[in-house]
Amino acid sequence: MRIGVIGTGYVGLVTAVCLAELDHHVIGTDVVREKIDLALAGRPHIYEPGLEELLKKNLKEGRLTFYHDLDKTIKDSDVLFVCVSTPQRPDGRADMTYVEGVSRRIAENLNTYKLIVEKSTVPVRTSAWIKRVINLYRRNAEPFDVASNPEFLREGSAVEDFLHPDRIIIGVESAKAERILRQIYARFADKILVTNIDTAELIKHASNSFLAMKISFINLISELCEKTEADVELVARGMGLDPRIGPQFLRAGLGYGGSCFPKDVRALIHIGEEMGVDFGLLKEVDKINTRRIEIFINKIKQALWILREKKIALLGLSFKPHTDDIRNAPSIAVIRELQKEGAFLRLYDPQAMNNMKEVFPEKEPELVYCQSPYQALEGANAGLIITEWPEFQAMDLTRIKDIMSNPILIDGRNIFDPDEVRKQGIEYYSMGRK
Ligand code: UGA
């Protein structure tokens, strides 16, 4: 069995590499030539722990290859994983143009039976559309099946998540499709849940929206903590001790970013609208999340009053630690707001600076990229923690106190113990606690 992976972005590249690691023969393809050239050279175009080693290993052992040619990838494969992006349109809906385009190409190249598996996060009923498109554009009567196998990997631990899944959701409408997918995931037989296709598609959207809701919920509680003597970290810990609630995804802070939660929450609101189901609940989740930036900026103003020409260090630019991904990162919104106020920004991130330079090119003295957190903090009027990279938690607070012009830290991720920081003579603000 040969597996083709169409689209080698975050999900696609990890899927291709990990399916090869599961001993399958895999071909990856992408419209962006450079991604394929890099992959063939054993260099992932993204930073993801463990990915490069497995990419090199599987290329060398001959189970994995990459084609520039989509038609040939389709023709040479028995199973096709569709991993193309479904970006957000200006109105919040998911843009399905790439999925439709790939479906047409599959139809045109249907040379033998194929199982088409959608892995991208898609609105419920997408498989039904893929099937219709293939039937409309096909040139012969070769049989095919569609299936949904949503991906649950998290950036920063994607390889680990793929190779140690909590669950494998398989949405199918034929016994043959189920048999093939069970074979592909044979190593995780006890983790497989088989459903119909609509259910599988919805499990993915419902899971991401639920997690986003958990984050917004604790962030709303954090707003209340700031008006009282309560401490959101302890509220979360106390809530999380109830196994029905659980401790995960209750970290208050700058809110959720990334390529999934913001987009998926909005997409589900629209899916609901189209189907006549009111997702007002998720509209609030989105609103609370957007408000986090405003609350954070107000803390900076509370500390510095006027921000014009103040030197502000931003530590952490990626949307979360252990990735170089800056899509929908809270840092972008924070930078835009501070630029409006005329502040002079000093940016540092262990992995994401190259990506950020494409959005915000360096311009002295308004926006400068630094080589270390200390360089960013040197002479600064305030330091902001935007992403909770472990490197920041390990910083030397005495040194920080000495090098800053005004030793003020505004911690958007609650990485420090307030007493510890204040003991060093640093003025300290955090989220949802005194
Ligand atoms: C998320 C899901 O966790 C994955 O299961 C899913 O496969 C993926 O989306 C996807 O749809 O592709 P990811 O976006 O990589 O994964 O990152 P998460 O670890 O879920 O974090 C999302 C955002 O929530 C980050 O900005 C993070 O900082 C924020 N967050 C997370 C909080 O603000 N508080 C928390 O307690 C947890």
Image (tube, helix red, strand yellow):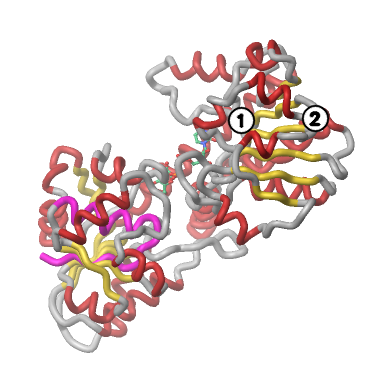
Does the magenta-highlighted stretch encompass residue 14?
yes
Does the magenta-highlighted stretch encompass residue 363?
no
Residue bounds of the magenta highlight: 1-22
- Place of residue 307 in the rendered image (x, y in percent of width and height, measured from the top left): 85, 40
Query: Which numbered mark, 2 or 1, is in the foreground of this view?
Result: 2
Residue on which disc 1 sits? 219
- Place of residue 434 in the rendered image (x, y in percent of width and height, measured from the top left): 70, 16
Q: Is mark 1 within 8 Å of ligand 1?
A: yes
Residue 204, labelled with which disc?
Answer: none
- Note whether 197 is above or below 429 in the view shown: below
Q: CA distance from mark 2 to mark 1?
A: 31 Å
Q: Amino acid at mark 2?
A: Ser
Residue 35 figure quarter: bottom left
In the image, what residue occupies the spot 51% across and 27% down? 250
Q: Amino acid at mark 1?
A: Asn
In the image, what residue occupies the spot 15% across and 70% down? 78
Label 2 Cα crowd, 10 Å radius (few <14 / some 14-19 / many 20+): some
